Image: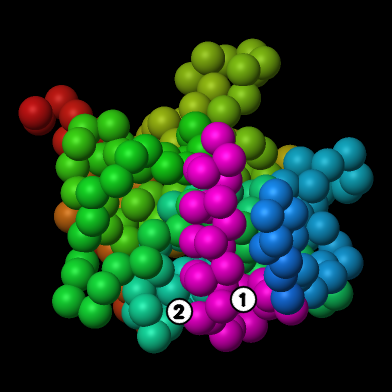
Amino acid sequence: MVKENDQEFKAEVTAIGRTNHKNLVQLIGFCNEGQHRLLIYEYMRNGSLASFLFGPSNKPKWYQRMNIALGIARGLFYLHEECSTQILHCDIKPQNILLDDSYTARISDFGLAKMLKTDQTRTTTGIRGTKGYVAPEWFRNMPVTVKVDVYSYGILLLELICCRKNVEEYVEDDAQMILGDWAYDCYAGGNLHFLVENDDEASQDMKRVEKYVMVALWCIQEDPSLRPTMKKVILMLEGTIEVSVPPDPSSFISSI
């Protein structure tokens, strides 16, 4: 356990030490002396996205949530394509997104991150990440690529759209238990308004709701080759390119 923790600590220091982007938390310093390991990050006054989305206070505003979604996408694009060393975060979830004074999203916790060599696009490694956000290829002994982060981002995007957790055990309708499945059912059935029915701002912006849900559904495709890159995700969210009709995300399972 100590060795594993030491490896995670070194991975985090190495990964975050190579980064510099407004949507990533900045490492100020660290201590690694024997059993004593400490990371010092800049203070994020508004806490985690998990507390912001799922806490007891009033539901966050729709446009604020969408700005956060775009910020996370830009941070991941930087890690995947603009950083000096390509980095797979491997644990994108609301608890690992921090919010600064202006509610700008900052990706944090690089303890499970995987760095790829210059000529490397995929890697093989043990399962990393958090249940509910882990891409299916982790469980199939398939090589993992940046598309594992895209999958996690898609789940997170749906949570931001609907302002609810990916898995809700206590719901009146079992069809709503798994957010990804419910989102696709609502999209395919022309009932997207159910996803934001208690959100007046979002309900008045249904074109954007539809576009963002479609992007999320592309991101959570079971087949990693169907998932877009984070660059394409940003272009779709910004409206620079059209979003095509996504297939059922789980259709890949039934075909193998």
Residue at (15%, 26%) from the top-left corner? 254
Residue at (37%, 38%) from the top-left corner? 127
Q: Quadrant of residue 63?
A: bottom right
* Amino acid carrying mark 2 in the image: Tyr
Mark 2 is surrounded, within 10 Å at the Cα level, by few (under 14), some (14 to 19) or many (20 or more) other residues, namely many
Q: Is residue 199 left or right of residue 148?
A: right
Percent coordinates x, y for residue 216 in the rendering: 42, 53
Q: Is label 1 in a helix, a strand or a loop? A: loop
Percent coordinates x, y for residue 29 in the rendering: 73, 75
So how many labels did they put on this image?
A: 2
Residue at (37%, 79%) from the top-left corner? 85
Residue 23 shows which numbered tag? 1
Q: Is residue 141 above or below residue 117?
A: above
Give the position of the C terminus as an image quadrant. Answer: top left
Q: Which residue is label 2 attached to?
A: 78
Spatial CA distance of label 1 from label 2 is: 9 Å
Q: Quadrant of residue 70?
A: bottom right
**What stretch of residues is rendered in magenta?**
1-28
Could you tell me if the residues under marks 1 and 2 are in contact, i.e. CB atoms within 8 Å? yes
Mark 1 is surrounded, within 10 Å at the Cα level, by few (under 14), some (14 to 19) or many (20 or more) other residues, namely many
Q: Is residue 249 above or below residue 110?
A: above
Q: Is residue 140 left or right of residue 58?
A: left
Reading the chain from its start, which is encountered first: label 1 or label 2? 1
Percent coordinates x, y for residue 145 in the rendering: 27, 58
Q: Residue furthest front?
A: 34
Q: Is residue 81 left or right of residue 21?
A: left
The one of 251 and 4 positioned closer to us in this rendering: 4
The one of 167 and 135 positioned closer to us in this rendering: 135
Whether 16 is among the magenta residues is: yes
Q: Is label 2 in a helix, a strand or a loop? A: helix
Give the position of the N terminus as an image quadrant. Answer: top right
Q: Is residue 34 above or below residue 57?
A: below
